[in-house]
Amino acid sequence: MFLITCPFCGEREQSEFKAGGEAHIIRPKQPTELSDDEWAEYLFMRKNIKGVQLERWNHANGCRKWFNAVRDTNNDEIKAIYKMGEKPPSI
Amino acid sequence: MLKNLRVKTSKFIDETTNVSFKFNGKTYYGFKGDTLASALLSNDVHLVGRSFKYHRPRGIMTAGSEEPNAIVQTNDNSAFTEPNVRATEIEIYDGLEASSQNCWPNVDFDIGGINNFLSPLLPAGFYYKTFMWPASFWEKYEYVIRHSAGLGKSPTEPDPDIYDHRYIHCDVLVIGAGITGIMAAKTAAKNNLKTLLLDEKTELGGSTIYQNSDFIKINDQSTSTWLENEITELEKLDNLEIKTRTSVAAYHGYNYLLARENLTDHLSKDDAKNKVRQRLLKIRAKKVIVATGSLERPMVFNNNDRPGIMLSSAIKKYADYYGVATGQKNIFFTNNDTAYESAISLSNKGIKVEAIVDIRENSNSEFTKEAENLGIKIYKNHTVVDTHGYKKLNKISIMELSKDGQSFTNSNKTILDCDCLGMAGGWTPAVHLFTQSGGKLKFRDQDQVFIPNKYPSDQISIGSCNGDFELDEIIKNTSKSLREFLNINQTDFDNLDTKCPKDKIVRNIWLLPSDEVIGKTKPFVDYQNDATANDIKLALREGFRSIEHVKRYTTTGMGTDQGKLGNMHALGIIADTTGIKVGELGTTTFRPPYTPLTFGTMVGRNVGEYFDAFRRTPMNDWHIENKAEFENVGQWKRAWYYPKNDETMHDAVQRESKAARDGAGILDASTLGKIDIQGTDASEFLNRVYTNAWSKLAIGKCRYGLMLNEDGMVYDDGVTTRLDENHYIMTTTTGGAANVLSKLEDYLQTEWPELDVYLSSVTDHYATASVCGPNSKKILNKIIPDLDLSDENFPHMSFKNAKIDNIKCRVMRISFTGEHTYEINVQANFGKSLWEMCMEAGEEFKITPYGTETMHLLRAEKGFIIVGQDTDGTMTPIDLQMDWIVSKKKYDFIGKRSLYRSDTMKEDRKQLVGLITDNPSEVLEEGAQIVANTNATPVEMLGHVTSSYYSPNLNKSIALAVVRGGKNMMGQKLIIAMENKNINVTIVDPVFFDKENVRLNA
Ligand SMILES: [Zn+2]
């Protein structure tokens, strides 16, 4: 179980958090204008790479805030944490 | 006659305290401090079990947790019984009972032993190959196989013991309290680091604590004396917590480790009573020092498994630590110097060592010379080719090895008498925890060992688990590692004078040759699973290449010991056979737990009523007083029905359902999720999350809403009320409350941060009594006389603030039953008073409390869905025939686009319909499959029944179902295919009762 540093509460155990999948997938502003394929791309397609990926996390059993994390899926090392709306740090 | 095999008094054994125990029904005696293994050996009992596949007699091989053979069942025939416990780890106590596994009728005469003679017929993969054909026979074979196989018996009663969990946070965790672990713990604690030292054994000090060799010294002291002093010093230190009998089970990322602390298994039942048996330690360590030592390797040769064949280090430990001679005529069989150390130690205690068979051509250390001086015959360049004695070793045959080690120089065979053979095949670093943590290994060719290469977290391995086997290098490398790892200038061990004149020559032959034809030999690699070198070679001949595949096909390393002894030999034999180097084959993955954990330890206190948290409504006591039966809905305990006298559930539900429509009913609706929504964009927010339009909902009005996932599937539903311009209260399903809040938060925080909206869960803040039926208005009028209940002032789907005796309440006129209904919400702590007030006011109208089952029945009569019962995450609102709730005008809402995907628009999706049975008294089973034609092969499944009841208000059976293309099948006949009969049904509109909603406004 990893330790995650919530940007609002500090370092807590993973059991307090909920993973929210790949980050920076923006909900289309005009879904009705999209083709089935384009909508499916937003709805279903996620990378889930082996390596450094940007993820959403929610401090579900804490402050309930969502934030982003940079995690290396090889060893679960969380390299950086940044708030929603912020640009990912260069790593 | 019972031999006394105790050779000397040992300070680790309390010879003044006799302990009586039973093994296989027979009473034996040992001393306090003995393990079951040492006590049995002191009684000359070697035969302790039968092997898994061939049922060969097996004895005690080791003196530790790596034991593959001596696994026993403790406390037979009681709730305390435990299978697969290693006799080498059980500390005996008065009253201990243990028995052999894998044998029937008993260990001395085991019918399954015939498998040994059939063994040429039982090669690797035998079960897969033979019994899988013809497939239909498998069930018959399986019965016989399962009966003769099996590893112990599971207890059949709940575990009466107490278990516990504890979190520990420390600066430094040291795993293993051998010589290097002691050095590490002392250094860390002396440098003001909060340190935790764990060891699976009873005593600190590992194998050094009983090492008294004239040749191995630290500062001119014997190593045990030196270490004893160190331990005395160590125990005085602050900052240090020491736990023995504690085995680290798992090493996860982020230096998070799980360990099992054994607290009472060494105590008698009386002493252990009411105490915590085992504790799971959940450890967060800033730094971890792994000092887990190494495991001695056996040698792989023909018939290397007879009782009496042991590891050389185990023989030494039984003699030096337990004071037990494991044999009267001992022979050691070795490829390195350690067996000489054992042999010398035994000789000095007066235990006869006949010979040492050494596969090396040369060794000239002080140890070999001393062994010769002691009169031990040494056979250099020889190997054991066979062993003899069925239930106990009595002879071995040896031959002279050829230069390449694969055959013999001549055909001369020497037979040597012996009753105990000590194998010393070199050492395997215990890297299990290191690899569990994600560490990568490297292979060291010179002595054929895998050692830690890359650390995945802030940790180091020291001592023999890091490949340092001899005292001088252990001391030197450990003190250096500690200085670097703990970032300190010096340790107490930087200038020790060590003496350890061992010869480091090792001759490694993974599979020793035999003069027998291959196929007739039994060179065991994995003792516990009865896998031989021949099985591994067969697997390779049959085309298996990956170590992972060979492992599974031969079951090598797949026992409860995870192949701690034999895995390296398996790799070596594969390497020799395929010509690929061991280092390039890679190892198999070690998985937690290092040694088996009990289920009790894993669950700790979370058993019975503590398995999960319960939530109870403020009216709960009333429900209990009135004999309600309860059902679990999520974590909630909800009143299910209220049986009167001897009513069955069916009778109670029929009565309650009738009463609610005929007079008045009352339901505890407190468990529904409630989310308080405030902010200037609250209306816009609801527009986006529900399928229907919300902007025009007037203050004081209520509206039903359906919430979808982005994939268009129904996620939750409920009524939301506009309390004020920018203030709503949303209700959700009981089970969905937490997920809905989290989903809404997600959209608010991540997709629409521009919206001014705030969400709060207020489920627990309110208690809700729902009063329904033709008399509900009269009842409410008695409770709140000054509230105008006329349809003009307070119509269906509206809300009023009111007061009951100065207590504020919110009253919603909304209905889930189709009856005229008021939902009264008060602050939670007034819930029970509110309920009692309603009961009192309703008495003259025969108000009837009803539970969730009646609620379900009443809503089914009206065709109202229950999300999660009539839907399963694959139903769109269109599938539910709820097109009316999907706004065509709104530009967007969650899931809208998905309703126009080609898949969701298919006509033949499963759709919600009503079903009535031809026989009106026949009630369908929920989940039953629906078909049209039972003669087709295969029968096409059209759908299934989702809700089914006998309706007392319609006097017939009704059901809801999902049926492929059901929307266009009104009036069609279908069949519910049950095990013994077919039930004829007709598809109908899902609204069975009061289609015109007359009663809502009655
Ligand atoms: Zn937080």
Image (tube, rainbow, N blue to C red):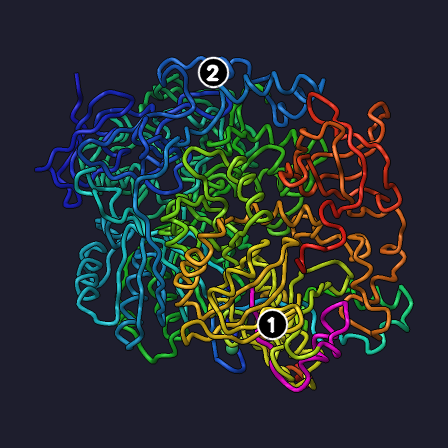
Identify residue for label 1. Answer: B799
Q: Of the residues shown, which amino acid type is indicated by label 1?
A: Phe
- Dots 2 and 1 on the same chain: yes
Pick the residue in front: B455 or B892: B892
Q: CA distance from mark 2 to mark 1?
A: 77 Å
Residue at image position (42%, 29%) is B152
What is the crowding at mark 2: few (fewer than 14 residues within 10 Å), some, or many (at least 20)? many
Taking depth in this image into account, of A50 and B743 the one nearest to the observer is B743
Say if the magenta span includes residue B694.
yes
Q: Residue at x 18, y 37 (%)?
A: B349
Pointer 1 indicates a residue of which chain?
Answer: B
- Which residue bears the numbered disc 2? B112
Q: Assess disc 1: are there few (<14), some (14-19) or many (≥20) residues with their C-alpha within 10 Å of its C-alpha.
A: many
Q: Is residue B942 visible?
A: yes
The N terminus of chain B - image quarter: top left
Q: Residue at x 17, y 42 (%)?
A: B271
Q: Amino acid at mark 2?
A: Gly
Q: Which span of residues is magenta-colored?
A: B673-697
Residue B148 vertical position relative to residue B861 in the rendered view, above or below: above
